[in-house]
Amino acid sequence: MRLEINYIQMAEQKNVTTNETGVQGQYKTWFLDYASYVILERAVPAVEDGLKPVQRRILHAMKEMDDGRFNKVANIIGQSMQYHPHGDASIGDALVNMGQKELLIETQGNWGDVRTGDDAAAPRYIEARLSKFALEVAFNAKTTEWQLSYDGRKQEPVTLPMKFPLLLAQGAEGIAVGLSTKILPHNFIEICESSIKYLRGKKFELLPDFQTGGMMDASNYNEGKRGGKIRVRAAIEERDKKTLIIKSIPYGITTSTLMDSIVKANDHGKIKIKKVTDATAKHVEILVELASGISPDITIDALYAFTDCEISISPNACVIVDKKPRFVSVHDLLKISVDKTKDLLKRELEIKLGELEDKWHYTSLEKIFFEEKIYKELEKKHETWDKVIAAIDKAFDPFKKKLKRAVTKEDILKLTEKPVRRIYRLDIDELNEQIKGIEADIKQVKHDLDNLIDFAVAYFENLLKKYGKGRERKTEIKPFDTIQAKQVAIANTKLYINREEGFIGTGLKKPARSDQSGGDEFLCDCSEFDDIIAFTKRGIMKVIKVADKSFIGKDILHAAVFLKNDDRTTYNMIYTDGKTGTSYAKRFNVTAVTRDKEYDLTKGSDKSKVQYLSVNPNGEAEVVKITLSPNCSARNKEFDFYFETLDIKGRGSMGNQVTKYPVRTVKFKEKGTATLAGRKLWFDNVYGRLNGDEKGVLLGSFEAEDKILVLYKDGSYELTDLELTQRFDADKIAWIEKFEPEKIITAVYADLDKKQYFVKRFKIETSTLHNKFFFIKEDKHVELETVTTTDDPVLYFEKGRGAQTQKIKYKIGKNIEVTGWKAVGTRFEDYSKSVKMHWVEPADGANAQQSLFE
């Protein structure tokens, strides 16, 4: 840890530096005083108890008022103002904020809702009291350091003796002068478990957890230090093809602000929806109705890209340590807090030991006083009371060696205050029992002091047991894919082109001439994030950003939305070199370029020109008819050229010579076939995405008309196309592969009502895309156990326990007939929770997906 700001040191040194006078010196002094005050007294929490001053004063006031019953918040605010020299609004806001976190304060009444942003009711209508957890971990007058309140009338704690890493549980946020702090809340159970691991010298990991739930990618959390970042998303599900449902929201976002961001994105044309409705009650539920023909998958991505459904949070753990602000990690915070807790527990044990030894001492004196009849000195006549005390003290002389400390005058006075009465044997026995009990307690406390680590571990284990129920993690931790805005943006802008003058843009409106030539023509729909690729007659290629009006070059041959890293779209071109008059043909891809740079696709000579250009999305190679100039000396002035004879090379290649004679025309003659191999696709089971980047499981090589089969754990299947924007929940997938109509699916499922396992084999008979079909009964008492598409499946089945265990291999493929996909199947075995089953993997590894989706 290192000091990051010197305001406090500067304030301390201002009186020993140069003596500045006048207005300038006063302003410097005032600023340093103000900066120090804001940092220490308002914005940044103390590391000792994890509280800002206003929070500490509220809790102290509530402890003074505590009688086990609820108190009006207005009354709590009034009591807190005895310690906090600010208005009631700041105290009320801090109190509501703590109450909504449901840890230190129990609430009664309408305290608002952090999910919807609804405010709490007025302080006179709501009530609060300290929670049992707060009373256990935050207060102990014997270990508290005290100071005078701002007006000197009362005592208030410097810090509370907090025996828990409260700062990590509640989080904190504040803006001071020149610095800020943002510590995210963490899970109560995980804090306790991490504290135990730290005490035992083990490694631990702490990640944020939010009341609002949602999903979180914490791969760059950096232990909460400056420079770290987390991404938080709402949980969005597809209710049907026309409706999305948002079931949780990101931290710091309310349903109202989230809906506002969705409406704003729709108004700006980034998404297309009909309406958005807040149906939040016990659980968050925001319904998003999609416009007709809009893909749910693309809309989910667009919601993450353009709305508050995904936000980034940058933590910045700054706390007050020794009256100075320091930047630390959440791991450092936990270690400091746990060490502080251990020290407080040690102090409490030492205080308890002292109290027990005092109690043992006095109980032993009392036993001796009555058992040895020393009390009879009170019946004797002595000149003064001091001599009575001296006589009693002398009577104790034979027993002083057995005592743990000296006998004081206060001890004797306390004994003389007891009524002198006849002492029965039972009274002495009671004292002996008390002494034995005290000695046992002393022994236990000494044992705890000698084994302080174990005692602290037991303390956190007890907190976990007493208060951990219902505090399970709410925020799901999972890695997020990066959504490219241009891939999901709605094409809501019309793009125009003036081929003759060489302009492209969204603001072109020049009408055509009377003969319908020239003018601006509609090119395509695009989004503000798109790039445009264009080719001119001169052989110049250029990629530009969509703009109101951009100049490309006169005589534009082709323009379209540019797809970066597209290695399948192939350009077939024939051009004539301006210097030699020779014509060349070439085939090339354009995968990556520098925006706004001109690329010459010819040999670079003046007056070179493009004779023919075609764009082929799957590398098609057509046949063209070339007609030469009638005045040339070539014998054959007309011939066909086959592009399939050319290899696909880089855009800068010269190409192959077609003819050295002047070309009159090049015309399309015959459509060609695709010359590219099928596209290989992988399934990334981390992000649930199809991709061509070799991430995840290879599904195979696909042609445009091929489909993908997805088998789900709920007993349904779905056929999908090859669109890479599709979203899959990998946790719900049992199997995914390239669809082959003749392939047989084998499934084993359990009918819990009938206490039976069933097995069935079937083919996919439907052809509808993006629709789920259940191949087992859609019932909560029917569960899919395992499924495979192996040609000759063999099932390993283990049932029974101990010596009665049976291990069987069933050759399902040879014994079960193929039926329709709606059939019930064949009874297989009796159901049992102890059954274990899996497919025996064939030698060719066809079952390799099993480990990924089990």
Image (cartoon, rainbow, N blue to C red):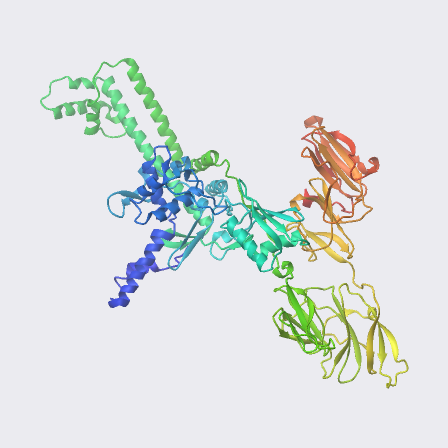
Above/below status of 334 relative to 635: above
- Residue in the picture at 25% in, 20% down: 368
Left or right of residue 545: residue 367: left
Asked where in the image residue 347 lies, by quadrant, the reply is top left
- Residue in the picture at 25% in, 17% down: 371
Outermost residue on the front side: it is 514
Rendered location of residue 124, percent (x, y):
36, 40
Rendered location of residue 334, percent (x, y):
44, 46
How many marks on residues?
A: 0
Position of the N terminus, as image quadrant, is bottom left
- Residue in the picture at 25% in, 61% down: 15
Above/below status of 277 relative to 22: above
Rendered location of residue 473, percent (x, y):
53, 42
Left or right of residue 671: residue 338: left
Q: Nearer the viewer, residue 481 or 242?
A: 242
Rendered location of residue 111, percent (x, y):
43, 41
Above/below status of 318 relative to 817: below
Q: Nearer the viewer, residue 252 or 602?
A: 252
Outermost residue on the right side: it is 635
Asked where in the image residue 647 lies, by quadrant, the reply is bottom right
Note whether residue 203 is visible: no
Asked where in the image residue 616 lies, by quadrant, the reply is bottom right
Note whether residue 601 is visible: yes
Position of the C terminus, as image quadrant, is top right
Outermost residue on the left side: it is 383
